[in-house]
Image (cartoon, helix red, strand yellow):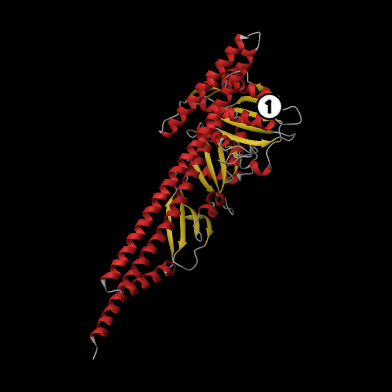
Amino acid sequence: MVSSVSRRRIVIGLVALACFALLAAGSVFWRYRDMTAAILADGATLHRILSQRVDQHDAHLTSLAALAQAADPPPLDAIRQVASSITRFYPRIQAIELADLADEARPPLLSAGVPLEEAFAAAHQSTATLTVVPVAGAEQVMLIKRVPATGPSRYLVIMLINLRKLVEIDRFGPKPGMVQLLLDGKPLLAVGETGDEAPVVFEAPLASRTQPLVLCVASPLSLSAAVPSVTLALIALGVLLAALILDRLLAARAAAREAGARAALATQDARLAHASRVNAMGELASGIAHELTQPLTAILSQSQAGQRLAARPDLDRASIQTAFEASARNAKRAGDILGKLRSWITKGQPLVEPVDLVQVIGDVVQLTAEEATAHAVTLSFERPAHPAIVRADRVQMEQVVFNLVHNAIEATKALPHPPRIVIMLSTADTTAELRVRDNGPGFEAASLTRIFEPFFTTKRDGMGLGLSLCVTLVERYGGTIAARNLEGGGAELTVRLPLMESALGTLLGEAAE
């Protein structure tokens, strides 16, 4: 005869087994759902990145087409320069060509190594403004844009895209998994593998009206991989303890442990929130200190110069007045910088207006002349014969030029040979180009690729924010910035910004004369 104790234990055991089965099934289900969601999120992330990249292709093709229509015949030197810049900064774009659709026997205009026969054949078969053509036997596609887009087209702008570099599965794709790019249902690229297990598939067309590519991401996911062994062991242990603990005292102790865990989690959350606030304040303070160092240094330099002039027996009022005006100008500049920082914090917009780079550079040269003279640095400015007008915020452009010139002075002030800095400003086609060149030691090979990274610095007391800020400000107004070492020693930093239409009109008028 079964005793009441045995019956109670049997009932407790059955209830505990049922609870364990339910909890284990729920845990596996939730883990499987989370893993599936993570795979789909990876696919959505890759889809967003690729959509942005194909939009960049449209922008590049539009720019090149505009250049090709700017004159007859097209300005090949300007097109070649823009194409070289694009292929240098976007490795997935392997080559860019401009072909004469009216004279197919004519040699390639840019000699970029693009398969022109396939391009001409595709152009004759399609009348679309932009056509996507797979390259046979290669993981490449050609983007063919007609120029002009309306009416009979004379030229073809051809861009050769490396699909493997476009996808970059090592950086963005699921691991392990398979990434495919499809065009009209046919695979152009297949990278990776899914194995024998049933995959979770993300498939969607890229968000482009001109490039009808479809992204397919498949990652294997088995039910065994979704079984959380540690979690199941903890569930079993908890069920066993719950089955054995039948009195209120142990139940109260379990509730106390749960309350303690919640309190510890709340404490940890508070600490993390405090650490986040401290970190944000530290970054903001570093940025303010870095930005205000420049005008405050200039104010100190001009004030000291004014003191020295005032101490002379032959009082030079004009020079003292100049020093005071420079101090006032830099004090206003410091106020403008604080205003810009406040605007950034409150999501304000910079004051974008026509800015003459010749005047900006002239002001910066005058601002840094005292520092250059103090270190025996020869500072010269080779200015163009006409204004170089760009659309930008004047204070931010002064920050960029000041940073470049100040860094050049810092690099050359301790040289064994006479230090020299040359600032060159020129305009060509649609671009203003500023070069700051010095005869200092140049950049180390390991540092040259990282000098524009935030908080990376080669100075002992630097914060690594100057050049990073320059990149942000220049790119904000559609420009680029680059650095290189000169063959004879020294370094050169180059800033390129798009000219305004008024400046372009001046250049075109002079060219016509």
Q: Above or below — where is 110 with respect to 230? A: above
State the residue position of label 1: 421
Using the rendered view, name the quadrant where residue 439 is placed: top right
Q: Above or below — where is 267 with respect to 404? A: below
Q: Is residue 272 shown to the viewer in this render?
A: yes
119 relative to 254 in the view: left or right: right
- In x, y percent, where is residue 117? 60, 45
Q: Residue at x 35, y 60 (%)?
A: 260
Amino acid type, residue under disc 1 in the picture: Ile
Q: Residue at x 54, y 52 (%)?
A: 168
Q: Report the front residue among 490 and 305.
A: 305
- In x, y percent, where is residue 383? 63, 21
Q: Residue at x 64, y 44 (%)?
A: 113
Q: Residues within 10 Å of mark 1 (few under 14, many from 20)?
A: many
134 relative to 261 in the view: left or right: right
Q: Is residue 129 shown to the viewer in this render?
A: no
Q: Report the front residue among 30 and 431.
A: 30
443 relative to 144 in the view: left or right: right
- In x, y percent, where is residue 292? 53, 29
Q: Quadrant of the N terminus?
A: bottom left
Q: Secondary structure at mark 1?
A: strand
Using the rendered view, name the quadrant where residue 114 is placed: top right
Report the residue that reaches farthest toward the bottom: 1
Q: Above or below — where is 499 with respect to 463? A: above
Q: Quadrant of the C terminus?
A: top right
Using the rendered view, name the quadrant where residue 295 is placed: top right
- In x, y percent, where is residue 212? 46, 47
Q: Report the front residue among 374 and 217.
A: 374
